[in-house]
Amino acid sequence: MRIISIYYVEPEMFELQSEISCPPNEPVLEYRHGSPERKRLQETRAGLDGQEMEIPLIIGGREIRSGRLGKVRCLHDHRRVLANCHQAGAKEVMQAERAAAEAWRHWAYTPVSSRLAVFRKAAQLLAGKWHKRQGRIGFQPVEMDQPKIC
């Protein structure tokens, strides 16, 4: 058993809280029959039919292929395989633990303003070009995959 001590002191955090503005969430799309967003979703799905992607592990920013594969199946059609994903074993878990500890060392000394920039960029990507790439069944509740920035 390992014990990890974490020390976190960030005096500027309280100063920044008043500077953080809450941007509005994007409009909720309904994916109704014949709507442009539903058509875009159906075109994307049709383009993926018959393709099986391979999903590697990402450890420390690198792609790791363990060779132990699992199937990722479509939620509403379990016979349909969407991808093969590499599964982690003890070796990969240890690599991930070391990578997380190293990342924490860098992140712990990153100013709050720089951390905010990272999360704002992620929110922009999720609300923008990556949002349209999210797979979703047309009849699922729309709110379940809308990025919540606030």
Image: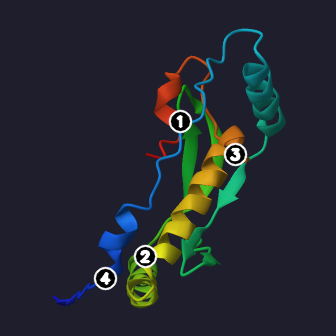
Q: Secondary structure at mark 3?
A: loop
Residue 10 has which mark? Answer: 4
Q: Residue 107: horizontal and vertical position, in percent?
A: 44, 83
Of 125 and 112, nearer the camera is: 112
User: Which-is-in-front pick, marks 3 and 2?
Assistant: 2
Regarding residue 131, the answer to whether it shows in the image is yes
* Three-letter code for the amino acid on which mark 2 is drawn: Val
Q: Residue 52: horizontal and vertical position, in percent?
A: 73, 48
Q: Secondary structure at mark 2?
A: helix
- For residue 8, side relative to residue 67 (left or right): left
Circle nearer the N terminus (2, 1):
2
* Three-letter code for the amino acid on which mark 4 is drawn: Glu
Residue 112 has which mark? Answer: 2
Q: Residue 112: horizontal and vertical position, in percent?
A: 43, 76
Circle nearer the N terminus (3, 2):
2
* Three-letter code for the amino acid on which mark 1 is drawn: Gln
Q: Quadrant of residue 6?
A: bottom left
**What is the quadrant of the N terminus in the image?**
bottom left
| Disc 4 residue crowd, few under 14, some 14–19, many 20+, Cα 10 Å | few
- For residue 30, side relative to residue 51 (left or right): left
The residue that label 3 is drawn on is 128
Q: Are marks 4 and 2 in contact (CB under 8 Å)?
A: yes
